[in-house]
Amino acid sequence: MSIKTLPVYILLAIVFLFAVVPMVWLLLASFDPVATQATKIPGDITLSNFREAFSGRSLRWISNSLLIASITSTLVLFICILAAYPFSRLSFSGRSAILFGFLLLRIIPISTFILPVYIAFAKLGLINTYLGIILILTTLGLPFPLLLMKGFYDTIPREFEEAAWIDGCGKVRAIFKVLLPQCGPGIAVVWFMTFTFAWGEFMIPLILLRRMEMMPLSVGIFTAFGEYGVVDYGFLSALSLMYAIPPVVMYIFIRKYLVKGMVGYIK
């Protein structure tokens, strides 16, 4: 280690501490029956915090998050499969402007347009409904996956489709029979990206939902923090770990497809 590289190693060590220490505290506190703000090894290791986190309303919050994220990611994937095709294969006036508009929709902060959305949803009876949450998350989750799916289509030679057309295959059927089998990694990237976005969304369900039993886990953790004037660090730590498990487990199982998908998109 030279003098020139010393600041780099110091910076990496600081980043490592800020990233790892909170996770270590979270893990230790989740098994501690009397967890506090201090980082310490539990005197008695217990699973009671996890049992509490996986029961009652907490279990309902987890189910709500899985329901919202799964439906949203599946809807976005299906729409992207069809909508990305004309952007990839067809030349039409305003194509770049439409793509820019989609990106602009995602770049603008959610708080900018949440008020008109709330007013419109109130008139349509979509406040405090899963349908309302899924509709707005699907809309917000479309731009980047749409661009990714277009990129995957761009890497597939047109000759495959032309051969299918000669055999009497229509354009929609060619998408599902010819393009999609070659876009497996891309499909995994789009679905996983949208799932993690919907799974982690906080502001939209906080504003559009009123009943606690309908809240996703992201809002549930927030409302449970300091409830009744007491902070149950053990329970909240276990609940937070459970909140992190689904995306991590999914990533472990599909990581090779994610790598292939991102490499294919870059190409």
Image (cartoon, helix red, strand yellow):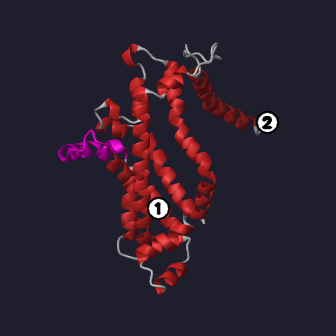
Say few, some or many: other residues with alpha carbon within 10 Å of mark 1 (under 14 / 14 to 19 / 20 or more). Answer: many
* Front in this rendered view, residue 79 or 262: 79
Query: Label 1 near label 2: C-beta < 8 Å?
Result: no
Q: Is residue 140 above or below residue 13?
A: below
In front: label 2 or label 1: 1
Q: Quadrant of residue 157?
A: bottom right
**C-alpha separation, residue under disc 2 versus residue under disc 1:** 44 Å
Task: Provide residue 34's location: percent of width, then percent of height.
Answer: 55, 13
Task: Provide residue 73's location: percent of width, then percent of height.
Answer: 44, 52
Which residue reaches farthest bottom?
166
Q: Is residue 152 left or right of residue 110?
A: right
Q: Is residue 158 left or right of residue 212?
A: right
- Which three-letter amino acid code belongs to the residue tagged 2? Ile
Q: Where does the magenta region start and end?
A: 109-133
Numbered label attached to residue 147:
1
Q: Main secondary structure of the magenta part?
A: helix
Say few, some or many: other residues with alpha carbon within 10 Å of mark 2 (under 14 / 14 to 19 / 20 or more). Answer: few
Return the residue at label 2.
3
Task: Provide residue 207's location: percent of width, then percent of height.
Answer: 30, 36
- Which three-letter amino acid code belongs to the residue tagged 1? Leu
Q: Is residue 97 above or below residue 62?
A: below
Q: Is residue 247 above or below residue 18?
A: below
Secondary element at tag 1: helix
Residue 138 visible in the current orientation: yes
In the image, residue 128 lies in the stretch drawn in magenta: yes
* Front in this rendered view, residue 162 or 2: 162
Q: Is residue 231 left or right of residue 181?
A: left
Q: What residue appears at the point 46 percent right and 61 percent down from the top-left corner?
A: 147
* Front in this rendered view, residue 107 or 46: 46
